[in-house]
Image (cartoon, rainbow, N blue to C red):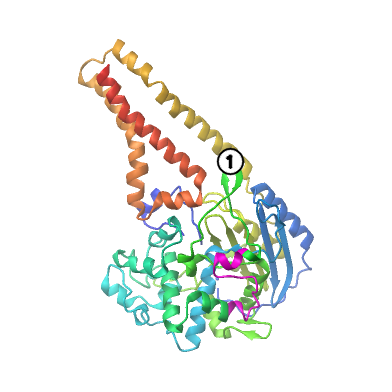
Amino acid sequence: MRAQTATVAASILLVCSLVLGPTPTKAATPAQAAPDFAAIDAYVAAQLQEARVPGAALGIVQGNRVVHLRGFGVAGPAGQAVTPQTPFIIGSNTKAFTALAVMQLVEAGEIDLDAPAQRYLPWFRVADAEASARMTVRHLLNQTSGISQAAGLAPIAGDGTGTVEGYVRALSGVALNRAPGTGYEYSNANYLVLGLVMEAASGVPYGQYVRERIFAPLAMSNSFTSLADAQPHGMTTGYHWWFGLTLPADMPYLGDALPAGYLISTSEDMAHFLIANLDEGRYEGAALLSQSGIAELHRPAALPGGASPYAMGWALETQNGLPTLAHTGAAADFSSAVLLAPESGWGVVLLANAQGMFVSPTGRIAQGVLDMLRGQTPAGAMGLTTLYLIADAVILIVTVFVVRSLVLLPRWRRQLRERRPRGALGWAWRVVLPSLLELAVPFVVFVFLPVGAGFPLWGVMAAMQPDFTYWILAMAVVLLVKGMIRPFLATRA
């Protein structure tokens, strides 16, 4: 989930993207030598260890075959080993499932890609009534509706007790960043709307549809549409980084954002899904979609300025000059990455039980695996240990400086009494200016950034990167107290 407007971008140099293919042809058999899966496993294990990720699961497919599955590390504090059958929240990789489901309904004649979303949800609208009537199903799938990134972030700050419809109805007050169909902007809100469009067109709840029409034919027997269903099957515990330490996180499962990011699956099951995307919509004896339907899912949107970097539930990337379909996913304490290389038939999925807004190595490791499958040198280590050593050192220095300056305020008062400022300029320099500077930080943190972001900034930050977030808020509170106490002490002096 990337912030788009200039204001949001400025407010979220702190907030990285939470989420995130040319049209693929039928998977071809690569000419290179067979890959060294032992070397790939060693690479993944080393990368996970360096990044302090407790557990992960890898799946590799080639064409219509699963060629490698492997679990790494532990699934939770009890120390149970991760296997290819261990469930993880897959985050925004859910969008590819939602897009596939919509295309199934298109081929069944129940949805028209170029019909307005209001045909299926007559009550749906954004702030601009005319734009609401022109926003099509295709616009939502291609992330070209004009709905902002910020508008789709609200569920992340929630506790999962809302509803998809509630979030979509709240879009009625949202102004579009651009006219529908004129530009790309990634937003979870697009796929929340699509989840409701699916339900209206099919007549069944989103979760039931995915279980019956996608999970079942793909033999995804350890994939789930709710946390309650996944827990008896060895569901992993999510983790957060806290100043370099990886600790279990008890984050809410956001079932009220299910169509955009909260399906649960395993590396083995996700491998079946990748095969369907590489093999023209087929998996073993099941045909989920036609060849043309899969091609449509993978085709970039046509925009006035050229092709979009996004298709339908898939991002289009070029890695080392080769076209790739890719997507990353991030829940508050889980991360995932999927990659498809249509020209060689390779597909990679990596699921992990740790996530951070600033430290999420899953996508980079998955790309390294794909590089090795192509006979190329994989990406190097992320350097998380060094990153946190530097960050922790800066945090410690700033904390000591801020707290010490608060503790020394009584001394400052005595010095002010002993050497009284001369005139208004002296008082302004010694008292007013320091107070204003100290109050400026909490104003920016508590007022300017949240208002400019247009979404619950600190709620989202706390969910995704609690260590840095709580530290920033704590320092802002200390400076607020100091900025308020200083004038009071000056009057007493």
Please name the predominant secondary structure of the magenta segment in the image.
loop
Residue 305: in sight, yes or no? no
Depth check, front residue: 113 or 126: 126
Residue farthest toward the left in the current orientation of the protein = 423
| Image: 238 above or below 422 | below
Q: Kindly identify the residue that appears in the image at 77 percent across and 63 percent down.
A: 37
Count of numbered marks: 1
Q: Position of residue 155 (x, y in %)?
A: 43, 60
- Residue linked to disc 1: 388
Quarter placement of the C terminus: top left
- With 275 as the anchor, is 101 left or right in this view? left
Residue 25: in sight, yes or no? yes
Q: Amino acid at mark 1?
A: Tyr
Depth check, front residue: 327 or 58: 58
Q: Position of residue 168 (x, y in %)?
A: 37, 68
- With 470 as the anchor, is 90 left or right in this view? right
| Image: 40 above or below 125 | above
Q: Splitting the image into 4 quarters, where does residue 45 fall? A: bottom right
Residue farthest toward the bottom in the current orientation of the protein = 109
Q: Position of residue 27 (x, y in %)?
A: 66, 77
Task: Tell me where the magenta segment starts and ends, as one range.
Answer: 214-231
Q: Is residue 158 magenta?
A: no
Secondary structure of the residue carrying numbered label 1: helix
Q: Kindly identify the residue that appears in the image at 69 percent across and 66 percent down.
A: 85
Q: Position of residue 356 (x, y in %)?
A: 54, 51
Crowd band around label 1 with a 10 angstrom C-alpha radius: few (<14), some (14–19), many (20+)? some
Depth check, front residue: 390 or 118: 118
| Image: 90 above or below 483 | below
Q: Is residue 229 magenta?
A: yes
